[in-house]
Image (tube, rainbow, N blue to C red):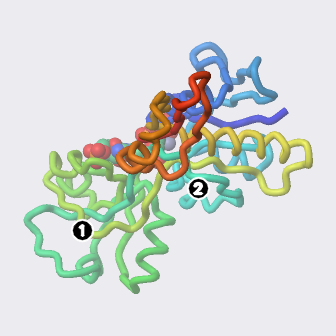
Amino acid sequence: MLRIAIQSKGRLNEESLTLLQDIGIEVDAPKRKLLSRSQTFPIEALYLRDDDIPGVVAGGTAALGIVGLNEVEEKGAQVDVLCRLGFGGCRLSLAIPKGETYEGPEWFSGRRIATSYPNILRKFLKNTKIDAIIEEITGSVEIAPAVGIADAIFDIVSSGSTLIANGLKEVETVFESEAVLIARPGLSEDEQALVDDLLFRIESENVSRGKKYLLMNLPKASLDEAIRILPAMRSPTVMPLASGDWCSLHHLTR
Ligand code: PRT
Ligand code: ZN
């Protein structure tokens, strides 16, 4: 039996559950219980705050977790990132008041930067040899410059509209993130077999997501033309029909 840590509420919760559902794994939503065993796969979901997921997986309480790569990086957790999941896309960026002139990272020298991601920021400042002051705050980071807590911020950006609404502009993208599946290193043979099954299902789901199954019966004489016209139809499946000069063409397409 595998235990998988999932965000209990927040931006990744719904899509994490949808992903599991899409690959045939039903678990109860976190409203009812914080630990929910699936009836369709030997797995149980453990619902947690996203900040706790990397540590719980690294520490072995859960074999797997679904969490933003930003959290894995920030916590420096010793986990294996098995695959990117294609949702929860965002970036960690530096932003400054929109009226400021920006010519490069030297702008940040001696300035105060508010963030909930001090470790990723510290690494960036070290690599760019910038000496700035990190003001660690846990929420409402975007408001920090306006209220005088900091000169700039380092925070998650997705559409960018929160920055604009707070009179800020994005000047450096430091880290690109999305939801990832993580695993505790050194899984047992049985656990690894289940994880391989899960990864196979996720991969199949990714391949088919957003695609359509095309089925077309047509005269054999028109087959070459159909393959030429139809999008990305490199190698369709062609099956004979009872009527000898007709065939059936099947293909997965976008
Ligand atoms: O309660 P818990 O601790 O579990 O949740 P949380 O509040 O810490 O995290 P949550 O649910 O907000 O986000 C979970 C994860 O979603 C993050 O760690 C990221 O990996 C991912 N993600 C994707 C985002 C965003 N997009 C995002 N836009 N996390 C936060 N935001 C914030 C951003 O900071 C900004 O304040 O949303 C706001 C709007 O962004 P714009 O740029 O679209 O305006
Ligand atoms: Zn959190």
- Residue 106 lies, with reference to residue 224, above or below; the image says below
Q: Is residue 139 visible?
A: no
**Residue 39, quarter of picture:** top right
User: Which residue is at the far top?
Assistant: 32
**Residue on which the image places disc 2:** 72
> Local crowd at mark 2 within 10 Å, few (<14), some, or many (≥20)?
many
Residue 64 left/right relative to 210: right
Three-letter code, disc 2? Val
x 54%, y 28%: residue: 18
Image location of residue 3, percent across then percent down? 76, 35
**Residue on which the image places disc 1:** 171
Q: Is disc 1 placed on a helix, strand or loop?
A: strand
User: Which residue is at the far left?
Assistant: 99
**Quarter of the picture holding the C terminus:** top left
Q: Is residue 87 visible?
A: yes
**Quarter of the picture holding the N terminus:** top right
